[in-house]
Image (cartoon, coloured by chain):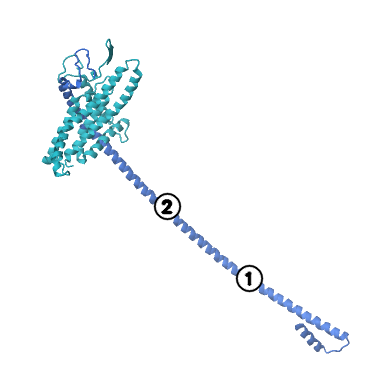
Chain colours: A blue, B cyan
Amino acid sequence: MATETVAGEVEVGMPQLDFSTYPNQIFWLVVALVAVYYILSRIALPRIGSVLAERQGTITNDIAAAEELKLKSVEAEKTYQKALADARAEANKIVEAAKADIQADLDVAIAKADAEIAVKAAESEKAIGQIRAGALESIEAVAKDTAEAIVVAFGGGADKSAIDGAVLDRLKG
Amino acid sequence: MAETGEGGLSIHPMDQFIVKPLFGDGPVGMFTITNATLWLALAVVSVLLLMVMTTRRRAIVPGRGQSVAELAYGFVHKMVEDVAGKDGLKYFPYIMTLFLFIVCANFLGLLPMSFTTTSHIAVTAILALGVFFTVTVLGFVKNGASFLGLFWVASAPLPLRPVLAIIELISYFVRPVSHSIRLAGNIMAGHAVLKVFAGFAAVGAVAPIAIFGMVGVYALEVLVAFIQAYVFTILTCVYLKDALHPHH
């Protein structure tokens, strides 16, 4: 440290070791410390402590409220899903019922149509049978007549019934 | 503080620590209003501004000032709780007082032309002795004679214990000395170095170096101002822990 000549009345050396100023410093220090202590313990610390506690409380409350809302939303989603599933089931039921109705109608219609077709087919069969029988009879008659004519043409005086029997045999065979 | 007289450069780095009356030139009596009084009062005002004015609105969502106050509160509160335990929280206002006073005094001392109250051993010795006596009395009140168990290291081998007891005893009584000199010494040394650099800044040739040196030292001093307050406070917490739980 600079221990050369110092201007004026000031002493040389460390002012920290100038014991004549100690009572002054100590007195004012104690005053200052007491003041700080009272400011802190009476006003500042309780105030800050309460603000911090209040904030903690607010945060806790908000978190709790958020949790509750979350639970509610989960519940709402569940209800929604259930409603959706119910609606689906209902729709499926309706579709099934409609299908069954349509099937029944269809079955009746098909049966009816089948019966009509069967009747028509039977009639047609009958008509065809008659036509076929008519045709056969005509063939028989034509064959018999033709055979008789041929026999006569060949000069044979054959028995008409014998010719008819031979023609019928021939037609069957 | 530097004058280039006829004899050359003369720097007075210690002049900044002189306690002198604010009004007039009389002797420094016990109740004289001195520069020390002024800067102690300013420290009190700073604490008031920092901790009371900023929290006036008691906002749930804090503003800038209130955040700082809450940060300081939380910082010291956690320190006391971590070091001294839950039962140490009863003494939280006391430790908070020490911390805020030292922090404010240290930072006020960094203002140019200011007087640094914490650079005086008289101030730090009172702070440290206050802690020492409080903690010692508290130790005996809380634990009775078993507070002396602090000096009797039960985990050491029996023949070593008396030796350790003497060492522990000495270290216990050295506590206030180291506690106070650490703070005053750090602050005083830093400020003296700043003044020396400032003195050299008046010399043309080395002025740039001196000014850069000042910037560096000043930055360091800003750190030291906080760290020394922190160290003082945490040591107080450690001593408090010893008083509350004297068994190792």
Where residue B209 sits in the image (x, y, percent)? 34, 20
Q: CA distance from mark 1 to mark 2?
A: 53 Å
**Subunit of label 2:** A
Compared with B206, A96 (above or below) is below
- Residue B187, visible in the rendered structure: yes
Where residue B164 sits in the image (x, y, percent)? 15, 39
- Residue B45, visible in the rendered structure: no
When asked about the image quadrant of residue B235, the answer is top left
* Label 1: few (<14), some (14–19) or many (≥20) C-alpha neighbours in 10 Å: few
In the rendered image, which residue does mark 1 sit on? A116
Q: Quadrant of the N terminus of chain A?
A: top left
Compared with B45, B74 (above or below) is below
In the rendered image, which residue does mark 2 sit on? A80
Residue drawn at the location 43% of the way across and 53% of the way down: A81
Q: Of the residues shown, which amino acid type is indicated by label 1?
A: Glu
Q: Nearer the viewer, residue B198 or B203?
A: B203
**Subunit of label 1:** A
Q: Nearer the viewer, residue B237 or A98?
A: B237
Residue drawn at the location 20% of the way across and 24% of the way down: B120
Q: Of the residues shown, which amino acid type is indicated by label 2?
A: Tyr
